[in-house]
Image (cartoon, rainbow, N blue to C red):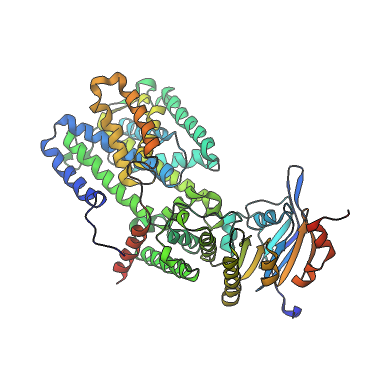
């Protein structure tokens, strides 16, 4: 690995998030390098999703900071963080169920467009042009995830595996620099998982994206990750290349249990 | 994939409605024109609540408060300062919108039933404040009377016919404006918030500002309805702006179908024409109304004319855009 050119895109320092008496994330230092696929793994309740929620602004941390591309984003509101270039998907898919697939993806363009109230009421030339651009970009994204034929279908009527891809398409429509995926392969069959891995590798290559993902499927983690961070009990217990992590006794103990 | 389709009710509705609107005054009595006027007022109120409740999914059961602010703004400014009532139409809209901005800013983060309770309180506070006659402006329980009729230059609006056209003209303009909003970036953002607030945030939508905008626009439109109401009745009093009035508006949106403009018109027709049709057995009116609501929720929970999405709508959107850019 040519470590010399590593550039940190996302960095958390001493990040801490508590819920009442429970410390979900405990003084966590996490780094994500540009152009890499980084995985965050750990047993259930390790605090992985909480990290995602803090990074994307849904939770406010008690302590510590999150920096993205050199800017402090701690405590910013979720839509501001999307604007900065972090997009996410959810562990339990969160689409807009009663909107069409196309509208779902169009929503992703919201933060990259500007038409206001007056422009919308008077249908200014610029607003019409912008709407046109939104539809075109959304359609392109739908084609990318092979959902273009279903563009007029309500999101809730689409099969589960395709809903996942739709959610990713919506996230991509926000033109992110960092895409944060929360268990993207959960609920997918082996073939869909395979396709998903290829897709993720593809977008990293072609769009110079950085990916941070939570994953339980070890085949996925080992198959696509450039870097793996392991959490347990809110703390980082290991990090490294996938094959290093695979044999790390601390990690094995965290997953399988062991003498304490 | 698509075979030639017969004209459906949905496609014929608009021309039929326009035809009915134009022909109606020819044979209608003043009484019927007045009924049609209030049908128009309730349509406006339904449209205004639909922005908040139908498009964004915010439970607002205090909408009569915004309606009242509009009506009283017109009544007070006209009777005290002699400003022409038509000139007060935009003023009432702005007053209600501003009021909505001020009172909903601190509560906008509340969800579902919590917001509902607070808006009920807000509506009641407005009504009780009006009864208590602050600064001697609102006339207490008697209200404000002696409001002038609207004039457009030399054209005085003083007949039932003129009022009928005035209110439906305003309804027409509002519908065009609201439909444009529905099909804009703002309308989509509203729908996203209704569907899933967390997902909307995570997709880059400023949930707070879009909710506030919906409240302000909804309230402004209710203010317009208040202005027209005041100019028609020539008197406003607190009893016209009770919690019951808010409930009626809520029912209009539910009956028609959340987020659907034709649905609102149908809902408003049901609410405003219903009491007229059942005038003869007024005592049972509420019973029938209640049963009708229950049956509706059981058999047609989406409303009588739900907003249709899906294939055709997005295809229409594309076609329209193509044509415009061709």
Total of numbered circles in the picture?
0
- Up-down: is A94 above or below B164? below
Residue located farthest toward the top when viewing the structure as drawn: B283
Residue located farthest toward the right when viewing the structure as drawn: A260
Residue A112 location (% of width, % of height): 50, 64
Q: Residue at x 45, y 60 (%)?
A: A101
Left or right of A81? Residue A119 is left
Residue located farthest toward the front when viewing the structure as drawn: A190
Report which quarter residue B302 is drawn in.
Answer: top left
Left or right of A157? Residue B262 is left
Picture quarter with the N terminus of chain A: bottom right
B284 and A57: which is toward the camera: B284
Report which quarter residue B37 is drawn in.
Answer: top left
B285 and B219: which is toward the camera: B285
Q: Residue at x 37, y 38 (%)?
A: B299
Residue B317 location (% of width, % of height): 34, 61
Left or right of B117? Residue A225 is right
Residue B213 location (% of width, % of height): 45, 48
Report which quarter residue B286 is drawn in.
Answer: top left
Left or right of A185? Residue B250 is left
Whether residue B289 is visible here, answered yes or no, is: yes
Residue A172 location (% of width, % of height): 54, 66
- Up-down: is A39 above or below B284? below
B297 and B14: which is toward the camera: B297
Whether residue B84 is visible here, answered yes or no, is: no
């Amino acid at each position: 690995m040519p470590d010399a050119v590593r550039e940190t895109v996302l960095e958390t320092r001493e990040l801490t998030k508590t819920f009442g008496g429970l410390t979900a994330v405990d003084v966590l230092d996490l780094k994500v390098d540009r152009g890499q696929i980084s995985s965050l793994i750990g047993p259930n309740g390790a605090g992985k999703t909480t990290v995602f929620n803090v990074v994307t602004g849904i939770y406010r941390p008690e302590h510590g900071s999150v920096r993205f591309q050199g800017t402090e984003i701690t405590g910013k509101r979720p839509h501001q963080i999307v604007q900065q270039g972090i997009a996410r998907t959810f562990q339990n898919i969160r689409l807009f169920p009663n909107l069409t697939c196309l509208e779902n993806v169009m929503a992703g363009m919201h933060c990259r467009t500007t038409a206001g109230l007056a422009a919308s009421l008077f249908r200014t030339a610029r607003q019409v042009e912008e709407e046109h651009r939104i539809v075109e970009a959304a359609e392109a994204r739908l084609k990318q995830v092979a959902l273009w034929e279903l563009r007029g279908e309500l999101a809730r009527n689409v099969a589960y595996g395709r809903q996942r891809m739709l959610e990713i398409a919506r996230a991509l429509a926000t033109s992110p620099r960092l895409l944060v995926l929360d268990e993207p392969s959960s609920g997918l069959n082996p073939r869909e998982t395979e396709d998903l891995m290829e897709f993720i590798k593809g977008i990293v290559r072609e769009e110079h994206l950085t990916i941070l993902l939570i994953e339980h499927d070890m085949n996925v983690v080992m198959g696509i990750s450039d870097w793996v961070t392991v959490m347990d009990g809110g703390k980082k217990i290991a990090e490294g290349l996938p094959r290093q992590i695979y044999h790390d006794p601390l990690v094995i103990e965290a997953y399988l249990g062991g003498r304490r | 994939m698509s075979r030639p389709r017969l004209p459906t009710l949905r496609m014929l509705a608009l021309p039929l409605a326009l035809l009915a609107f134009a022909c109606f005054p020819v044979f209608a009595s003043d009484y019927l024109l007045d009924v049609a006027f209030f049908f128009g007022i309730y349509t406006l109120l339904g449209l205004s609540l639909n922005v908040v409740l139908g498009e964004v999914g915010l439970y607002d059961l205090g909408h009569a408060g915004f309606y009242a602010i509009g009506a009283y703004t017109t009544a007070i400014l006209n009777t005290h300062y002699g400003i022409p009532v038509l000139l007060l139409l935009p003023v009432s809209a702005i007053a209600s919108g501003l009021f909505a901005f001020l009172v909903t800013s601190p509560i906008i983060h509340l969800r579902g039933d919590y917001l509902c309770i607070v808006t009920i309180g807000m509506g009641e506070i407005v009504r009780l404040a009006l009864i208590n006659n602050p600064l001697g402006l609102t006339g207490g329980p008697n209200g404000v009377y002696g409001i002038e009729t609207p004039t457009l230059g030399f054209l005085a609006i003083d007949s039932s016919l003129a009022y009928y056209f005035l209110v439906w003209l305003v309804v027409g303009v509002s519908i065009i404006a609201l439909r444009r909003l529905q099909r804009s970036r703002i309308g989509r953002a509203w729908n996203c918030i209704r569907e899933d607030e967390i997902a909307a945030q995570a997709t880059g939508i400023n949930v707070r500002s879009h909710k506030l905008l919906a409240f302000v626009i909804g309230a402004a439109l209710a203010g317009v309805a208040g202005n027209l109401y005041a100019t028609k009745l020539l008197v406003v009093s607190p009893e016209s702006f009770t919690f019951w009035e808010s409930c009626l508006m809520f029912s209009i949106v539910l009956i028609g179908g959340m987020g659907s403009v034709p649905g609102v018109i149908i809902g408003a027709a049901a609410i405003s024409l219903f009491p007229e049709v059942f005038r003869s057995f007024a005592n049972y009116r509420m019973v029938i109304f209640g049963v009708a609501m229950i049956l509706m929720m059981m058999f047609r929970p989406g409303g009588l004319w739900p907003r249709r999405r899906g294939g055709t709508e997005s295809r229409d959107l594309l076609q329209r855009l193509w044509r415009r850019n061709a």
